[in-house]
Amino acid sequence: MKINCIIIDDEHPAREELVYLLSEYDEIKIMDQADSASKAVTSIQKNRPDFIFLDIQMPGKSGFDVISEIKNMKKPPLVVFTTAYDQYAVKAFEKNAIDYIMKPFSQDRLEKSINRVKEILNLKNENLIQKELKKLIEKTITIKKIKKISVEHKGRLLLLNPDDIVFCRYKDKKISIHTKKNPYTLYGINTLNHLELHLASNLFFRSHRNTIVSFNHIKEFSPWFHGKYHLTMNDGNKTELIVTRDRVKLFKQHLGI
């Protein structure tokens, strides 16, 4: 039996990423996509999906507004919130989400959401799932606050506080971690995708496929050629980095501009 869903996100790359990841699941049918809250409500009322992937922060009305507008449907869809901001987690539960997944999406995390949807649709055990999920999120947020980054330095391993990281860059099959004073080689994490998940918080942003920057250490920024943004970091070298054109909108949203 097919499980019908709708993807709602104002960012085209985010929608495309979910479409690609969901292609691994033969039982999932994507009925529609929407890039705004108003289009989402119309599509949900028309298509009556089993569940939706719903971005929280969109221009104009938010994902929470979508929930408010469809809550009185005879059979509203299950909701999996998608967000780059983990501070929305608690509010997501107040709006009866069954799950939320952080951007960038990973196949493993998505599979957990799909399994959660299946369990609720099959067992109608939404209250139990809500309780388990709330505990999981509270635990996850607590863990994020104490995470350290392991790096190599002069034959020894050091633990860096994420607050000290200016930017991270993948080059020559290695990930370098740059602080204000020194660069280090990352230890124990092999890809920027995994590092991004490890660092996941509002402090860090994937500005380029090879670069993660800390918002706390951006000295200045300005528009650049071909829709890109130019960053100057506050390390000793005043390193100059780029926000690629497809990431500029999300970059501005993080800064509230």
Image (tube, grey):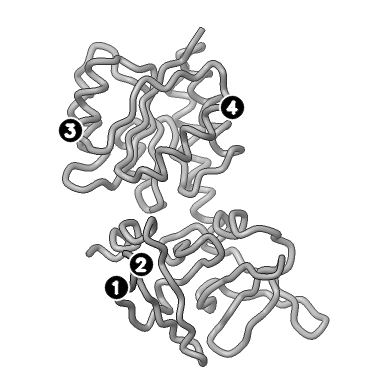
- Specify which label sits upstream in the sequence, 3 or 4: 4
Q: Tell me whether the residue at label 2 lies in contact with that at label 1, contact meaning CB atoms closer than 8 angstroms.
A: yes
* SS at badge 4: loop
Q: Mark 1 points at which residue?
A: 223
Give residue 128's position: percent from left, percent from top: 48, 24
Give, as a three-letter code, the residue at label 1.
Pro
CA distance for labels 2 and 1: 6 Å
Q: Mark 2 points at which residue?
A: 228
Q: Is residue 173 above or below residue 15?
A: below
**Circle 1 crowding by C-alpha within 10 Å: few under 14, some 14–19, many from 20:** few
Q: Is residue 28 above or below residue 109?
A: above
Quadrant in the picture for residue 44 = top left
Give, as a three-letter code, the residue at label 3.
Ser
Give, as a three-letter code, the residue at label 2.
Lys
- Specify which label sits upstream in the sequence, 3 or 2: 3
Q: Mark 4 points at which residue?
A: 24
* SS at badge 2: loop
As drawn, the label of residue 38 is: 3
Which residue occupies the extreme bottom position in the image? 236
Q: Is residue 162 above or below residue 84?
A: below
CA distance for labels 3 and 4: 29 Å
